[in-house]
Image (cartoon, rainbow, N blue to C red):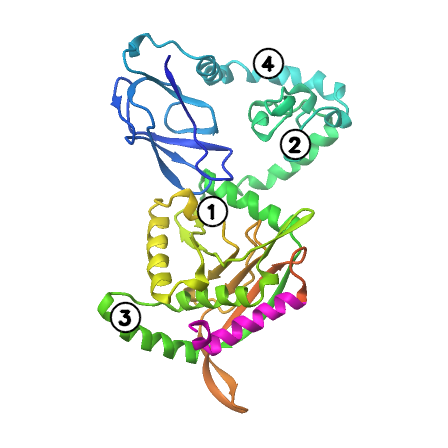
């Protein structure tokens, strides 16, 4: 029996991916651990390794194909003793081949069928079929009648992936009209030089998740100024001592530590909303927002409270470098109990960050700058940063968020407290 090589789920939010590049061809012999393909997920472009030994008998999905669903057969491997040239196509492979050729002949038929189908499908038709909430929203936006779709989910439930091949125009005109109006602004104004850039899976996921975050998570914001002088002095002293080990602490390393310790001091802020329950974490795992080509990713430094600054610095540097190279393993950017986003290197003074669901908060840090500041009841010039916490009000009350921000400020201004 040939071995079916299927599109893997390379991140917890991945539903489909792009088969960016095949690293093998039909007839190649592969062993467990060999690199087979590069797959663009919703997080990064990752290499896919072989698990089984054998010969690549058939490549089902061509490189460059978008929207390949998780679990879909992408290639067939002939096992030991099998003739690779005699391996038949699986039913899934035959469907994939048919789907690849079908669109050329369908548009005219679909257009003719759209007119009579529209009045026949009442607006409430979607309520009589089984579908996920996301599938219902997408169907409404695309003007698709759910009753005309066969679901591939449990018990025939229609899921997001089933809408990929659905034809618009089968729903009532009232539902289709908003989709047309929403699409109009996408056209570039005439006379302005421009280009259309295809969205990567990462950019699509960022758009989806952050839109859902702003629409479904009740954000509130708390802003505080912190005198950075004591922290900068401590950083200089520690770097002098670490020079022989080749380690250099950044300001962000100390801020990550301060946020982790603050969460440990205010455990009611180290939480996550989960419907009718609240998840309370007993460890501070901090996600760092790292800009990469085409988007951003949030590698996680785990157990920040119990790690020395030297290790936090080494891990942060390594994670950021591998994030930019697309070399992070899924477990290195999954999870996290809170996030920190630092735009100080761009000279940004203050900003409000969008919560990264399902986390309960994110800290936005601006640039350190010389400002008039009251020190010991006297006006002085100090290096000050502005930090803004974005909180999920479903999980973290205002007083708890304020307590966390006060703890963070104290640890930044008296940084020896986070080393004790």
Q: Is the residue 180 above or below the residue 104 in the image?
A: below
From the image, state whether disc 2 or disc 4 is nearer to you: 2
Q: CA distance from mark 4 to mark 3?
A: 71 Å
Q: Which residue, given by chain and number where applicable, does mark 1 sit on?
A: 334
x%, y% of residue 340? 49, 60
x%, y% of residue 219? 64, 57
Q: Secondary structure at mark 2?
A: loop
| Res 343 seen here | no
Q: Which residue, given by chain and number where applicable, does mark 4 sit on?
A: 109
Q: CA distance from mark 4 to mark 1?
A: 45 Å
Q: Which residue, given by chain and number where applicable, does mark 2 sit on?
A: 132
From the image, state whether disc 4 or disc 1 is nearer to you: 1
Q: Secondary structure at mark 4?
A: helix
| Res 266 seen here | yes
From the image, state whether disc 1 or disc 2 is nearer to you: 1
Q: CA distance from mark 2 to mark 4?
A: 28 Å
Q: Is the residue 321 above or below the residue 8 in the image?
A: below
User: Which range of residues does the magenta coloring cover?
Assistant: 399-420
Does 322 appear in magenta?
no
Q: Determine contact: label 4, label 1, CB under 8 Å.
A: no
Q: CA distance from mark 3 to mark 2?
A: 54 Å
Q: Determine contact: label 3, label 1, CB under 8 Å.
A: no
x%, y% of residue 231? 42, 76
Q: Main secondary structure of the magenta part?
A: helix
Q: Earlier in the sequence, mark 3 or mark 2?
A: 2
Residue 242 - label: 3
Q: Tell whether 161 sits left or right of 347.
A: right
């Amino acid at each position: 029996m040939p071995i079916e090589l299927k599109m893997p789920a390379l991140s917890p939010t991945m539903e489909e991916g792009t088969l960016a590049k095949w690293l093998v061809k039909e007839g190649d012999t592969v062993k467990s651990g060999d690199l087979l393909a590069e797959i663009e997920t919703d997080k990064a472009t990752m290499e896919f390794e072989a698990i089984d030994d054998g010969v690549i008998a058939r490549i089902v999905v061509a490189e460059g194909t978008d929207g390949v669903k998780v679990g879909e057969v992408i290639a067939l491997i002939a096992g030991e003793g099998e003739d690779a040239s005699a391996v038949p196509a699986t039913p899934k492979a035959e469907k994939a081949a048919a789907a690849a050729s079908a669109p050329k002949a369908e548009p005219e038929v679909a257009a003719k069928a759209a007119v009579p189908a529209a009045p026949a499908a009442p607006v409430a038709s979607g309520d009589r079929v089984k579908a996920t909430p996301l599938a219902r929203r997408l169907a409404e936006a695309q003007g698709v009648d759910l009753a005309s779709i066969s679901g591939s989910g449990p018990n025939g439930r229609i899921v997001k992936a089933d809408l990929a091949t659905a034809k618009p125009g089968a729903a009532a005109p009232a539902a289709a009209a908003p989709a047309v109006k929403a699409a109009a602004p996408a056209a570039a104004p005439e006379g302005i030089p421009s280009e259309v850039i295809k969205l990567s899976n990462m950019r699509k996921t960022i758009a989806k998740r952050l839109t859902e975050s702003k629409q479904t998570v009740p954000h509130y914001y708390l802003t505080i100024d912190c005198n950075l002088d004591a922290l900068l002095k401590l950083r200089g002293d520690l770097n002098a001592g670490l020079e022989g080990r080749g380690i250099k602490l950044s300001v962000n390393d100390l801020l990550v530590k301060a946020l982790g310790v603050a969460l440990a001091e205010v455990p009611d802020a180290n939480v996550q909303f989960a419907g009718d329950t609240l998840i309370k974490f007993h460890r501070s795992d901090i996600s760092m927002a790292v800009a990469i080509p085409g988007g951003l990713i949030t590698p996680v430094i785990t157990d920040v409270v119990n790690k020395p600054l030297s290790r936090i610095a080494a891990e942060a540097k390594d994670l950021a470098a591998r994030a930019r190279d697309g070399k992070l393993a899924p477990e290195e950017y999954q999870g996290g109990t809170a996030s920190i986003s630092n735009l100080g290197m761009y000279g940004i003074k203050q900003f409000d960050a969008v919560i990264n669901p399902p986390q309960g908060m994110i800290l936005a840090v601006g640039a350190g700058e010389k400002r008039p500041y009251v020190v010991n009841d006297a006006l002085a010039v100090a290096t000050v940063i502005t930090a803004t916490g974005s909180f999920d009000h479903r999980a973290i009350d205002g007083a708890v968020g304020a307590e966390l921000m006060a703890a963070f400020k104290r640890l930044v201004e008296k940084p020896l407290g986070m080393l004790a």
